[in-house]
Image (spheres, rainbow, N blue to C red):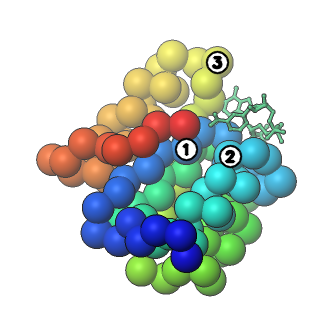
Amino acid sequence: MLVNLTNSIKVVITGCSKGSIGALVAVALAAAAPHTLILLGRSISKVQPVIDEITAIDASTKVQFVTIELGDFDSVRKAAEEVKRVVGPKSIDYLM
Ligand SMILES: NC(=O)c1ccc[n+]([C@@H]2O[C@H](COP(=O)([O-])OP(=O)(O)OC[C@H]3O[C@@H](n4cnc5c(N)ncnc54)[C@H](OP(=O)(O)O)[C@@H]3O)[C@@H](O)[C@H]2O)c1
């Protein structure tokens, strides 16, 4: 582990379907034990394998899926509200 991010870092990543660059980043970050990883995507079925991989690496990281269709502004607004709900009063640290 290069750095330990436990209890501090909250990261939001869009486009996390299995096999995507977003998924690779999420799995790589899991090794540094961030507090929260919020994975955005169009389909939970494509992201669930990535969530399972992250949980196997570090079960202490909170991993949350949020649905988003980036071509639909209503979906983007809804996803932003959901991210705010998951993160709570603190802000996110990184958005990719
Ligand atoms: N967060 C990021 O900055 C990020 C993440 C991933 C990729 N990318 C960029 O995308 C390009 C291709 O990357 P890749 O090889 O990983 O391709 P890829 O395998 O096609 O993955 C792209 C990701 O973006 C999602 N996506 C595409 N259009 C979307 C939309 N309209 N709404 C919501 N999600 C959408 C895909 O979801 P579906 O599986 O549902 O199509 C998938 O999770 C690269 O230029 C890369 O830099 C950026």
Mark 1 Cβ inside 8 Å of ligand 1: yes
Mark closer to the chain start, 1 or 3 = 1
Name the one closer to the observer, 2 or 14.
2
Q: Is mark 2 within 8 Å of ligand 1?
A: yes
- Above or below, comparing residue 66 to residue 69 in the picture: below
Q: Is residue 43 visible?
A: no
Quadrant that contains the N terminus: bottom right
- Which residue sits furthest left? 89
Residue 91 picture location, percent across and down: 25, 42
Q: Position of residue 41 (x, y in %)?
A: 63, 43
**Picture residue at 55% right of the left edge, 44% below the top:** 13
Alpha carbon distance from label 1 to label 2? 6 Å
Circle 2 Cα neighbour tier, 10 Å, few/some/many (<14 / 14–19 / ≥20): many
Element type where label 2 sits in the image: helix
| Mark nearer the N terminus (1 vs 2) | 1
Q: Amino acid at mark 1?
A: Ile
Q: Residue at x 61, y 24 (%)?
A: 70
Label placed on residue 13: 1
Q: Residues within 10 Å of mark 3 (few under 14, many from 20)?
A: few
Quadrant housing residue 51: bottom right
Q: Quadrant of the C terminus?
A: top right
Please name the residue that numbered disc 3 is placed on: 71
Label of residue 22 in the image: 2
Q: How many marks?
A: 3
Ligand 1's quadrant is top right
Circles 1, 2 touching at the beta carbon (< 8 Å): yes
Q: Residue at x 32, y 44 (%)?
A: 92
Q: Is residue 55 left or right of residue 43?
A: left
Give the residue type that dot 2 points to: Gly
